[in-house]
Image (cartoon, grey):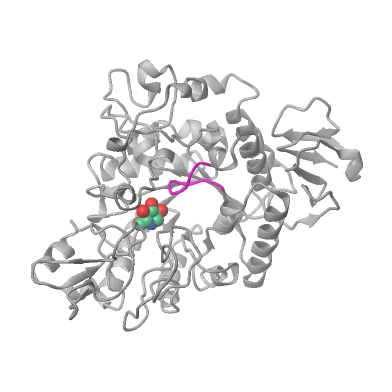
Amino acid sequence: MTNSDNDWWRDAVVYQVYPRSFADADGDGTGDLRGVRDRLGYLGRLGVDAIWLSPFYTSPLHDGGYDVADYRDVDPRFGTLADFDALVADAHALGIRVIVDLVPNHTSCEHPWFREALRGIGRDRYIFRDSATGGPPNDWESIFGGPAWTQVEDGQWYLHLFDPTQPDLNWEHPEVRAEFRDILRFWLDRGVDGFRVDVAHGMVKAHGLPDVGPKEGRQAEMLGDETVPYFDQDGVHEIYREWRPILDSYPGGRMAVAEAWVSSPARLARYIGPDELHQAFNFDFLLAGFDAKSFREVIDKSLTEARIVGAPTTWVLSNHDVKRHVTRYGSLARARAATLLMLALPGSAYLYQGEELGLPEVLDLPDELREDPAFRRTGDSRDGCRVPLPWSGTAAGGFGFGPPGSAPPWLPQPESWAALTVEAQDRDPGSTLNLYRRALRIRREHPALGGGTLTWLASPEEVLALQRDPGLAVVVNTGEQAVALADLGLAGRVLLASEALDDEGVVPPDTTVWVQL
Ligand code: NOJ
């Protein structure tokens, strides 16, 4: 890393751990914090700078833990606070930073505040309304489908932009604000290096909760860019201006990254800067198709907007909410090519557990095993990217997710994953795991990678060619014809290629190469 300690996040590679599906130390079929701690050596060897832990807090897990019942404790299925502290200590000893997920838009329905609210106490911490019509108070829809309102016994309705088990908090209430300032401090005091802020664009709703009005299709979708009165309201920025001094008051560069679905890179840039958050996920890159034109447009727009606010860009191809990029692009070759493009761009990159193994989405899970609350309401399910990681062995042995004799993993792993285990890929020099390891090592060592700028080089329409200074060119061939480096005016040694090359001078379709000029 080239950045100072405080700026470590500017070009960091952050690995997202979905604790439920990463590694199971206690053998109950659900991943846990001890499992993560046991595998820190694996992550160190992979070469990541930080891990981001998806929620591990006390939760009924109606939305995989994005429904928090106690923001200051670990769910017993994931371990204890002592396990968390030990994980942070060990990670730091290995030079790996730890980011935790913060879920401020809504709590679980099992949070003590909501239990009280149901008994008529402190309802104004949530968004309860009467309705004169007999139906919901307005026309807002849940992101998981259906109305965003549920009626309680005494006739009032409460707002939930997600599942009914995830009531939205009222961020106009000073107690809510004070509580989250305190939660930030609680985890900062335990040594976390940062926060990923869930639904960072959602906490403040338009005054008077106005109707959206008629719309074709769904009102708003996950990672979408719709303008609606419940997202991206100016008031959210006040919250981040309250949080930033808290983060800055701790040593060592504590940061926050926004998960914000907004209408443009310019709107996204408003979340970042010296008095708000440090980064925001750039989902436009993830949503781009595998073609040179789309990639280039998104890269240009993202870099321009980030430059205006003086912040680094982030890049991400997969996470626990979207179809894995192997399946989205239709092939492992394309996924590997897109990854090498991403890792060569200026800024920081977020990886999702299992992408380093080239895991595809599991498409054929039996319906009765699917747990995503969206599945029951819309038929769409995110379970297929959350299947536990295959570490070793064969299907019959449970792929080493837990110790021998463990309960089966909470979602079944396909038999075809026998060839994709960490154990199998570790010894195969051409494996996706070893490609990621090499890419991350070169990224760390090469002076052109990490921060810096990018210059586009002349190339045919279906090829991206770019230069990173000093001395590195990146060529991504998204077309159907091979392209010769000489025809692009690039003479140099191939440092890394996403596919084995027959001829060092020729880039086949669906392939990215890094060339030392
Ligand atoms: C975004 C999270 O990434 C997703 O998993 C969750 O369902 C929603 N926010 C609601 O918290």
**Is 482 located above or below residue 248 in the figure?**
above
278 on left or right of 296: left
Image quarter for ligand 1:
bottom left
Picture mark count? 0
- Where residue 185 sits in the image (x, y, percent)? 34, 62
155 on left or right of 204: left
Q: Is residue 323 magenta?
A: yes
To which quarter of the image does residue 238 belong?
A: bottom left
**Is 86 located above or below residue 458 in the figure?**
above
**Is 125 located above or below residue 92 in the figure?**
below
Magenta region: 317-324
To which quarter of the image does residue 8 belong?
A: bottom right
Residue at the spot x=24%, y=76% of the render?
137
Nearer the observer, 6 or 141 = 141
- Mark yes or no: residue 298 visible: yes
- Where residue 325 sits in the image (x, y, percent)? 55, 42
Nearer the observer, 492 or 460 = 460
- Where residue 10 sits in the image (x, y, percent)? 60, 57
- Where residue 26 sits in the image (x, y, percent)? 27, 29
472 on left or right of 149: right
| Magenta portion: prevailing SS class | loop
Residue at the spot x=36%, y=70% of the render?
203
Residue at the spot x=47%, y=24% of the render?
417
Nearer the observer, 189 or 52 = 52
Quarter containing the C terminus: top right
